[in-house]
Image (cartoon, rainbow, N blue to C red):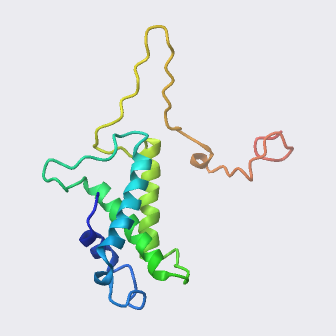
Amino acid sequence: MYSTPDEVRLTLAPLLPGDVLRDGPEGLPDEQIIDAIREADGKIDGYLAARYAVPVQPLSTGPDVYPAQVNAWSRDIAAYRLALTAHKLRPMDQNSPAALRYAAAMTDLTAVQKGVYVLSLPGVAAPEPSVGEVAVVPQPAVFDERDWGVHPELYRPGVMGGRGGW
């Protein structure tokens, strides 16, 4: 597991208001936290698998020490899942710290999956093309309409008077 129950408890403590958990994060059983960590780690592995060998191997500094960013994602996603469970039928504010940290983790993981965010982890080697084969190597887009301030709903090529029209 990329994080421990104690790390998740420490992450969860400031994220939940006192009225959500009667006994605070310390009252959550390890089994429930471990289940949330496993779900979080599975989600992380799903995003990393496109570019890296999964599961991520521990660092040489210790058997249960993982790269800081992977550990942080595991803690934040697991804490969010536990916060959802703790809220039960009450809706969770999407601007709550737990939701914001989850959203940030998912943004990072999406960037990793697309190759925009590069981790210092062993990668998945792409197969080498043999002689006479063509290799297509996808690269991230350099520019798109957002870089130029063009909004798709305003850009109507070919329409008289519209941007790009004549």
Q: Which percent across, then down, holds residue 58?
A: 21, 49
- The quadrant in which the C terminus is found is top right
Drawn side of residue 84 relative to residue 4, left or right: right
Foreground pick, 41 / 94: 41
Q: How many marks?
A: 0
Q: Residue at x 53, y 38 (%)?
A: 141
Front residue (pair 115, 143): 115
Residue placed farthest to the right in the image? 160
The residue at the point 84 percent across, 47 percent down is 161
- Residue 10, quarter of the rendered image: bottom left
Q: Given the current orientation, which residue lies at the most extreme left position?
A: 61
Q: Residue furthest top?
A: 132
Q: Is residue 120 left or right of residue 128?
A: left
Q: Which residue lies at the image location 28% right of the left edge and 82% below the top edge?
A: 26
**Vertical placement of 13 versus 107: above or below?**
below
Residue 162, percent across and down? 80, 47
